[in-house]
Amino acid sequence: MAFYLVAMAAIVYFLIIRPQRTQQKEHEGVLTSLKKGDDVVLQSGILGKIAAVTDKTVSLEIANGVKVRVLKTSVQAKVTVVDEAPKVDEAAAKKEEK
């Protein structure tokens, strides 16, 4: 009976707790490496370029001249932002022409 409890605890540790700790350490590494000029994505999905970094907050430029201040912990990851023009639906464009 005790063997089953130990086996279950080991399974929970290796499948849930350990991967979560490694993911948390990776996220902390990203947060400590943030610097001015990095492109980041927030947990809400907002993309921006870092304008300033303090101990607990980050100032993001999300559009030309628009800056917001957010908590460092809300930064999800560094990204490479590629500006794309919105794709036009050709069928909708033809309907509008008619």
Image (spheres, grey):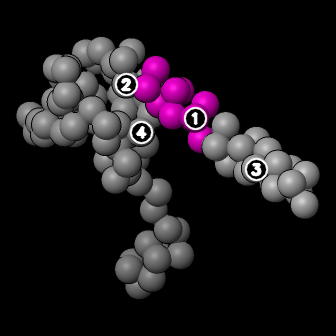
Give me the C-alpha separation between circle 4 and circle 1: 16 Å
The Cα atoms of the two marked residues, 2 and 1, are separated by 15 Å
Residue 76 disc label: 4
Q: In this view, does 20 lie to the left or right of 76?
A: right
Measured as percent of width and height from the top left, residue 46 is found at 31, 47
Label 4 vs 1, first from the N-terminus: 1
Residue identified by numbered label 3: 9
Disc 1 is placed on an element classified as: helix
The CA span between labels 1 and 3 is 16 Å
Q: Residues within 10 Å of mark 4 (few under 14, many from 20)?
A: some
What is the secondary structure assignment of the residue under circle 2? helix
Q: Is the residue under label 2 in contact with that under label 3 (CB below 8 Å)?
A: no
Q: What's the amino acid at mark 2? A: Leu
Give neighbour class at mark 1: few <14, some 14-19, many 20+ (Cα, 10 Å): few
Specify the segment rendered in magenta.
Answer: 20-29
Residue 48 visible? The answer is yes
Given contact means CB atoms under 8 Å apart, are the residues at marks 4 and 1 in contact?
A: no
Instruction: Please identify the quarter of the rendering in which residue 39 is found.
Output: top left
Q: What residue lies at 59% left-to-right and 41% top-to-bottom?
A: 20
- Residue 31's label in the rendered image is 2
Tell which circle, 4 or 3, labels the residue nearer the N-terminal end: 3
Residue 41 image-quadrant placement: top left
Q: Tag 2 or tag 3, which sits nearer the N-term?
A: 3
